[in-house]
Image (cartoon, coloured by chain):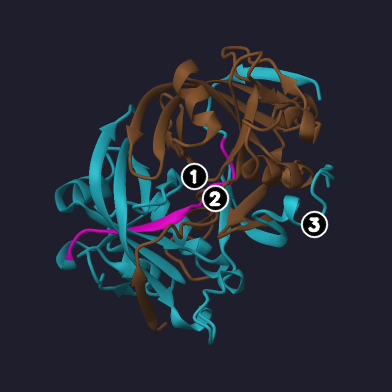
Chain colours: A brown, B cyan
Amino acid sequence: MKKLIWPGSTQLAPVSAVLVGCGRADTYNLITVAWAGTICSKPPMLSISIRPERYSYQLILESGEFTVNLPTVEQIRVTDYCGVVSGRDQDKFKATNLTPLPGSQVEAPLVAECPLGLECKVTQTLELGSHTLFIAEIVAVQVSEKFVNAEGRLELEKAQLTAYVHGHYHALGEAIGHFGYSVRKKPGNIVRK
Amino acid sequence: MKKLIWPGSTQLAPVSAVLVGCGRADTYNLITVAWAGTICSKPPMLSISIRPERYSYQLILESGEFTVNLPTVEQIRVTDYCGVVSGRDQDKFKATNLTPLPGSQVEAPLVAECPLGLECKVTQTLELGSHTLFIAEIVAVQVSEKFVNAEGRLELEKAQLTAYVHGHYHALGEAIGHFGYSVRKKPGNIVRK
C-alpha cells in the first residue's frame, strides 16, 4: 500500500459524462459535461461546471435553464462528439441525429434517445477558475416509458448507462451490492469482500 | 421513445460513492458520500454534500479539511458500512479494519487501502436544503504505487473502481471509447454505435 504523493488534480472517478441540453427553440444546443454531480436531496439539486469560453455557457447564463441527459452505451459515440465540437460551428442535434424533445418545465431541449432526462433551473452561479459552477434545482424528470415496469418502478439497470474514468468511457458492470446491504444480514460481521 | 414526466428527483447516475476521511488524529472519522463531483480543472476542485445532522459535518466544518478516497470492488462492503453507521457510535476505522494514513497537506486521514486519495481544503460552504455543499480545492493526491507503471502513468483501469446507481453499487465494465475518439478516425461520419 505504498503511496506516491502528487500535486492536486481532478482525479475523482468514475463520473458521468452527460449530454447537457441548452438554449431555446432556435438556439438548441448540446454540450457534454463530465464535471456534474448531485448536490442536494431536498430540494433535488445538481451542479454542472462549464468553461466560460464554451458556446453553451452563454446560452445557460441567459436562459437560466438546462437539461441533463444520461447517455447509454449506444449513445456514447455521439456523447463524445458533443464534447469535442462546438455549437458555434454546427447544429449538434442534426450532426448526431439525436432528437430534441421539449422540456415540460424548461425551454431547453431534452434528448429523446436518452433513457433519463433531468430538467434543471439555475439558482446560483459561482466562478471558480477555469470553470463556472451552475447550481440548479431539478424541477422535472423525463423517463423513457420502456424502462418503467408495470409497478411504475424505473428499471435503470436495463438501460446500459456509462461512466467516465480519466478520459475513458466505460460500460457499467455487474451490481455488487445495494445501499445498506453491509448491515442487513450479519451485523457486526463486517469484512472486506 | 415515449416519455413519462415525473417530479424532479436526484436521478443523476452513475455517481461515485466515495469514502470521505475527516477529523484530526483523535477524532478520525469516515463517511460515505455519493453526492460528490469534480467542479473545476484549474485550480483542481471538487464538492461534496453532507447533511448537517451527520457527525462528519461538524468535523469538516471545524477543520475545513477532508479527503476523498475512491473505493474498489474489494472495499465496497465497508464503503456501504461507513455510509450506514455513525461515527458518534463507533470508530469506523477500527470497525472496518481500514488503515488511516496521514495527509501530506491536511490533517484529515486518507484510507491506505484505496488506490487513490484526494486531499481537500474547503474554500466555501453553501447551505442548500437537506444538504450543505462543501466546495474544496484538491491540494494533493496520494496514489497507490502498485497502480503506477514504470513510465509514471496511473493505470487506474487495474484498480476495479466502482460506481453507484440509484442505491446499487456496480463494478465498472469494459472501456468503450476515450475522449475525442468520435472525431479521430472518420470525421463527419458520426453514427450511433
Q: Quadrant of residue A30?
A: top right
Q: Dot 2 corresponds to which residue?
A: A15
Residue at the bottom extreme, as displayed: B150
Mark 1 and mark 3 on one chain? no
Q: Is residue A69 left or right of residue B62?
A: right
The vertical placement of A54 against A145, above or below, is below
Dot 2: chain letter = A
Look at the image and give the residue range highlighted in magenta.
B12-24
Mark 2 and 1 residues: CB-CB less than 8 Å, in contact? yes
Residue at disc 2, secondary structure: loop
Q: Position of residue B56 (x, y in %)?
A: 26, 50
Sequence-first disc among 2 and 1: 2
Amino acid identity at mark 3? Lys
Numbered disc in front, either 2 or 1: 1
The vertical placement of B44 against A90, above or below, is below
Amino acid identity at mark 2? Val
Q: Give me the residue at 62% from left, 51% from top.
A: A163
Q: Give me the residue at 58% from left, 20% from top.
A: A23
The residues tagged by marks 2 and 3 sit, at their Cα atoms, a distance apart of: 26 Å
The residues tagged by marks 2 and 1 sit, at their Cα atoms, a distance apart of: 8 Å
